[in-house]
């Protein structure tokens, strides 16, 4: 019975990892709420098409995250599981946090090494969170 409980826990952990929610644990509820409020006013800056997730797309997402810290990405495709796999892959390759996913739009956050007040969405839309 002990090994069965352990196997059940492993299955749960694997499904949890596959769902992509493991990356969401680092932000507090208040931080996530603030980022969602700011993200509401944003438009997608990167759009993934039929080519999928290439190195160029990852570079563009990293550039946008470095400049803006909080961005929206639109992931094309009708298959939910494939979109979720791409979203998880984006988070892993960019070392960014997935703040929110609604349909095909993903809100992604990564703290910039050096914040640029003219480009950072956190600074530009700070009053939207109040």
Image (cartoon, rainbow, N blue to C red):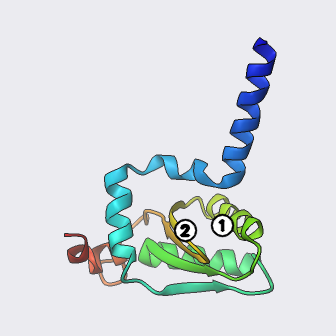
Give the percent coordinates (x, y) of residue 69: 43, 71
Above or below for 48 versus 98:
below
The disc, 1 or 2, on the residue closer to the chain's N-terminal end is: 1
Give the percent coordinates (x, y) of residue 5: 74, 21
In-front residue for pair 16/43: 16
Closer mark to the observer between disc 1 and disc 2: 2
Q: Quadrant of the C terminus?
A: bottom left
Residue behind mark 2? 101
Give the percent coordinates (x, y) of residue 67: 45, 78
Residue in the image at 36% along x and 83% along y: 41
Residue 119: quarter of image? bottom left
State the separation of the CA atoms marked 1 and 2: 9 Å
Q: Secondary structure at mark 2?
A: strand
Q: Secondary structure at mark 1?
A: helix
Residue 36: quarter of image? bottom left
In-front residue for pair 14/80: 80
- Asked if labels 2 and 1 touch by Cβ distance under 8 angstroms, the answer is yes
């Amino acid at each position: 019975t002990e090994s069965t409980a352990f196997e059940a826990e492993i299955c749960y952990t694997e499904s949890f990892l596959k769902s992509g929610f493991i990356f969401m644990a680092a932000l507090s509820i208040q931080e996530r709420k603030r980022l969602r409020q700011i993200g509401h006013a944003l438009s997608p800056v990167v759009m993934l098409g039929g080519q999928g997730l290439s190195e160029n797309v990852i570079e563009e997402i990293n550039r946008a995250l470095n400049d803006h810290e909080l961005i929206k990405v639109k992931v094309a495709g009708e298959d939910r599981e494939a979109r979720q796999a791409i979203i998880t892959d984006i988070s892993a390759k960019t070392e960014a946090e997935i703040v929110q996913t609604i349909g095909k739009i993903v809100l992604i956050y990564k703290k910039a090494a050096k914040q640029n007040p003219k480009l950072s969405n956190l600074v530009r839309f700070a009053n939207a969170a109040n």
